[in-house]
Image (spheres, grey):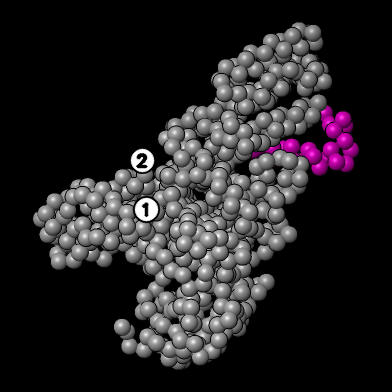
């Protein structure tokens, strides 16, 4: 036991507890009070250590004992993480519910990984082989479609003296490297990024199946994106969609300070969803971290770091990981509350002065990298932001904007008009579009970039014309500009709107996105040609084929439906032109 590991409580201020008589390091875990409530050191002032406690401190009083562990908050990493549901400090919620019922008692600790379950370990190295940190020494079939690659811990290297084959628990020795025993489980401090060899330029898209994102505002694998929006604009639904449909191999979903009913929806919905690529339950490639708004605020900060550490662990195996943080505003609010109790000098809106640094450190852990074992893995971080009153000028949104490269701005007006996803195409942007242009042109179509630019041009032109329309009405516009409004409406209603709960429209493949947008632009080109040849606009906008085109995105047999719509359109336009002559 470490010297000066025992002390006593000097002061209690909500989740912030001051302890004397211990000499810990910053971020060391300390257990405080008679109930052994877990916390970590966030400030040291002379002989006083200030602890942020991850649990409710009601009833804790000065004079009660405190115990310093001498180690920081660690995440347990190994087989069994996938399909798990944890709280912010990696306590498995289903096991706690089994033991305690619907309410978690304070001071209860439980291992993040099951110590009793045996896993079938198959070695892929042999005695005498030289290994270093990060090297894969064997595999475990964690779920039917995910192979868990058991790695040497980053700080271990040497020669394999012995390696076993068979069924083992996560804490049993499976390998001995230069006298050091190696288990399938690793423990890693959550605030310390895991090492890698090289970071790559993010030039491969994360295909999300959401048309407005993939086509207009794509995010790269290993990139960072932010979804800010006011209450009811669809942040959580958008993140659910990304979790369900993005082409990641592993999903880490952090419900950070969200409402309990939203987390309940995730916890009940995810186990019943089917992964479209494997036809297996989506939960088999998902880790859920649930930290609801009624849980202690200090655990919110821990939940974000626990989640990114688990994501880095799967990245090191060579997997593509999507991390959803919903929402970073709640995390920032927790920082603000702790900071005020520490009596620190407040920054803008009362947030601590180090808000930007904390956000940067979190998002910087994203990236597509070559791992220390030579594999390529990635973490794509997508954070929701909940600005009060949908005010994007507030500090959390502004500081996040400076860091991320894809900005998907949710619009309250669009949500009120029932346009979902309510992502505003005029204020959103993606800085990845340029670097991924080659990928789209090579893998989808050579005219992808020009088509995307044309669609954005029409939508921007519509915004300019709408200002005129509001003053003098649409009838005062020339027919060519009225047609521009009609084409823009088709792009908005047929392409940008997407039904998250429709069996077919919920996911749209990149090839389907291309064909659908191309058909809309072809409709616009043909309609403009008919207008130029003297056809009346009133007949062009009433074509039945436009409605057929709009319905095609909901059809199981999309290709045939689209073909029928375009054939009918060509026929109708030919008849309209004929009558105009």
Looking at the image, which residue is at 45% across and 56% down? 366
Q: Image quarter for residue 77?
A: bottom left
In the image, is residue 552 above or below residue 328? above
- The quarter in which the N terminus is drawn is bottom left
Residue 148 percent across, percent down from the top left: 32, 48
Residue 458 percent across, percent down from the top left: 68, 34
In the image, is residue 96 above or below residue 347? above
Q: Secondary structure at mark 1?
A: loop
Q: Secondary structure at mark 2?
A: loop
- The span shown in magenta is 454-478
Left or right of residue 553: residue 289: left
Closer to us: 297 or 121:
121
- Residue beneath label 2, please? 144
Distance, label 2 to label 1, CA atoms, is 12 Å
Which numbered disc, 2 or 1, marks the residue that appears first in the sequence? Answer: 1
**Is residue 458 within the magenta segment?**
yes
Residue 29 seen in the current view: yes
Left or right of residue 348: residue 576: right
Closer to us: 567 or 553:
553
Closer to us: 407 or 94:
94
């Amino acid at each position: 036991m470490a010297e000066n590991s025992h002390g006593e409580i000097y002061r209690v201020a909500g989740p912030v507890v001051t302890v004397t008589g211990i000499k810990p390091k910053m971020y060391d875990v300390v257990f405080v009070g008679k109930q052994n409530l877990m916390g970590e050191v966030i400030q040291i002032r002379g002989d006083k250590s200030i602890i942020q406690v991850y649990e409710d401190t009601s009833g804790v009083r000065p004079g009660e004992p405190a115990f310093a562990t001498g180690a920081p908050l660690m995440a347990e990493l190994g087989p069994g993480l996938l399909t798990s549901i944890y709280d912010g400090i990696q306590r498995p919620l289903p096991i706690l519910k089994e033991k305690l019922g619907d309410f978690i008692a304070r001071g209860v600790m439980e291992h993040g990984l099951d110590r009793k379950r045996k896993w079938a370990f198959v070695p892929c190295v042999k005695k005498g082989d030289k290994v270093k940190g990060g090297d894969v020494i064997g595999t475990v079939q964690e779920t039917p479609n995910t192979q868990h690659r058991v790695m040497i811990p980053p700080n271990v290297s040497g020669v394999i003296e012995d390696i076993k084959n068979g069924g083992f628990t996560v804490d049993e020795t499976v390998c001995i490297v230069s006298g050091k025993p190696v288990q399938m489980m690793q423990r890693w401090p959550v605030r310390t990024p895991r090492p890698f060899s090289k970071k790559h330029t993010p030039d491969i898209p994360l295909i999300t199946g959401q048309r407005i994102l993939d086509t207009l505002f794509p995010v790269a694998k290993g990139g960072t994106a932010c979804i800010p929006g006011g209450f009811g604009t669809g942040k959580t639904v958008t993140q659910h969609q990304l979790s369900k449909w993005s082409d990641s191999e592993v999903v880490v979903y952090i419900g950070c300070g969200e409402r309990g009913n939203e987390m309940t929806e995730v916890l009940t919905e995810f186990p019943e969803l089917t992964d479209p690529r494997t036809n297996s339950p989506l939960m088999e490639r998902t880790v859920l971290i649930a930290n609801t708004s009624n849980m202690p605020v200090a655990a919110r900060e821990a939940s974000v770091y626990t989640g990114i550490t688990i994501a880095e662990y799967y990245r090191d195996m060579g997997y593509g990981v999507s991390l959803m943080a919903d929402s970073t505003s709640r995390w920032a609010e927790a920082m603000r509350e702790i900071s005020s109790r520490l009596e620190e000098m407040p920054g803008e809106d009362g947030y601590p002065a180090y808000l930007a640094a904390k956000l940067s450190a979190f998002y910087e852990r994203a990236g597509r990298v070559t791992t220390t074992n030579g594999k390529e893995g990635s973490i794509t971080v997508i954070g929701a932001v909940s600005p009060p009153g949908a005010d994007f000028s507030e500090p959390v949104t502004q500081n996040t904007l400076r860091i991320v490269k894809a900005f998907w701005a949710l619009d309250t007006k669009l949500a009120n008009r029932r346009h979902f996803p309510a992502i505003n195409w005029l204020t959103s942007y993606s800085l990845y579009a340029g670097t991924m242009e080659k990928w789209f042109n090579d893998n989808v179509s050579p005219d992808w970039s020009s088509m995307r630019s044309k669609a954005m041009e029409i939508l921007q032109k519509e915004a300019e014309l709408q200002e005129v329309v509001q003053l003098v009405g649409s009838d005062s516009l020339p027919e060519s500009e009225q047609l521009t409004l009609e084409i823009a409406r088709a792009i908005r209603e047929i392409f940008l709107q997407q039904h998250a709960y429709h069996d077919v429209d919920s996911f749209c493949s990149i090839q389907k996105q291309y064909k659908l947008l191309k058909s809309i632009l072809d409709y616009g080109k043909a309609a403009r040609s008919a207008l130029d040849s003297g056809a009346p606009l009133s007949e062009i906008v009433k074509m039945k084929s436009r409605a057929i085109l709009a319905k095609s995105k909901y059809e199981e047999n999309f290709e045939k439906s689209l073909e029928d719509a375009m054939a009918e359109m060509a026929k109708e336009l030919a008849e309209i032109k004929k009558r105009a002559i």
